[in-house]
Image (cartoon, rainbow, N blue to C red):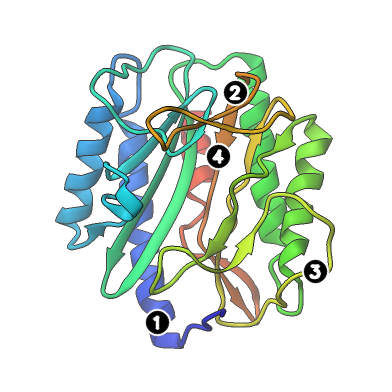
Amino acid sequence: MIALKTERELEVLAENARILREILRELADHVGPGVTTGELDRRAERLIRLAGAIPAFKGYQGYPATLCTSVNEEIVHGIPSDKRVLEEGDLLSLDLGLWRGGYYADAAVTLAVGRLRPDAQKLVEATRAALRAAIEAVKIGAHVSDLSYAIESSARTFGFYPVREFVGHGIGRSLHEDPQIPNFGPPGFGAVLREGMILCPEPMLKGDPLPVRILSDGWTAVTGGATLAAHFEEMVAVTADGPWVLTGWIGEEIWGKRS
């Protein structure tokens, strides 16, 4: 069942998204060679609690950390560790959520650790483009699969493959609400978008068509062919005036600062 948000609910969700955006911005400023993913996790939790919020991921279905830190061939749900030291040229995805006032916020960005190789740079550009395409498809009367089609079509033009095993989602009083938003598929199917829906499209792209593998920790998802992966996610409200990106295009902002 898809929950349409009231104006008051949208206000709370927008404020939560703003807080999350600020935290991701600060985390990005601390990413660099020699930093551990464990350090980033502790910083994320401290910033969330200072903002009067609660980490959304910690303890969720048993997940042991506040932040998901996925490096290089890791797609999503990478567990932070003080043993994982970031190195020059790494590709790091940060996925973070919080809960405040009865509602959730959720977003993800992929960052460069120092200078990226051209193939990694192209993957990031492709994933950002796929997210832009999905958000451009958000309009009253469109279908959920129009976003899926936009993501896959954009990815293919760059020569990359969308991850099929994980999906975007709605968000509100629950972290993951209906509708699910796959990263592939034909247009014109699924729920019709209505004003008051809050969506989290989150394209994850990789360089091979092989199935995703889950590591022995039970969480970390990696590419089947050990190719690089990238992941971006924004919170988007469906409005009469088109898509309202509640998280403020944080992925674009971070890359604008780093370019």
* Residue count near mark 4 (Cα–Cα under 10 Å), binned few <14, some 14–19, many ≥20: many
User: Element at badge 1?
Assistant: helix
Query: Counting residues from the N terminus, which is met first, the one under dot 4 or under dot 1?
Result: 1
Query: Counting residues from the N terminus, which is met first, the one under dot 3 or under dot 2?
Result: 3
The residue that label 4 is drawn on is: 231
* Mark number displayed over residue 9: 1
User: Element at badge 4?
Assistant: strand
Disc 4 and disc 1: Cα gap in Å?
A: 27 Å
Tell me which residue sits at (75%, 71%) in the image. Answer: 143
Q: Which of marks 3 and 1 is in front?
A: 3
Query: Counting residues from the N terminus, which is met first, the one under dot 3 or under dot 1?
Result: 1
Answer whether labels 4 and 2 touch (C-beta < 8 Å): no
Q: Where is residue 187 in the image (x, y as percent from the top left)?
A: 83, 62
Q: Which of marks 3 and 2 is in front?
A: 3
The residue that label 3 is drawn on is: 189
The answer to whether residue 104 is left or right of residue 130 is: left
For the N terminus, the quadrant is: bottom right
Q: In the picture, residue 86 is in which quadrant?
A: top left
Q: Which amino acid does label 2 sit on?
A: Leu
Disc 2 and disc 1: Cα gap in Å?
A: 38 Å
Q: What residue type is labelled 4?
A: His
The answer to whether residue 40 is left or right of residue 174 is: left
Q: Where is residue 182 in the image (x, y as percent from the top left)?
A: 67, 54
Disc 4 and disc 2: Cα gap in Å?
A: 11 Å
Q: Where is residue 156 in the image (x, y as percent from the top left)?
A: 81, 37
Q: Position of residue 56 (x, y in %)?
A: 31, 57
Answer whether labels 3 and 4 touch (C-beta < 8 Å): no
The residue that label 2 is drawn on is: 228
Query: Counting residues from the N terminus, which is met first, the one under dot 2 or under dot 1?
Result: 1
* Residue count near mark 3 (Cα–Cα under 10 Å), binned few <14, some 14–19, many ≥20: some
Disc 3 and disc 2: Cα gap in Å?
A: 30 Å
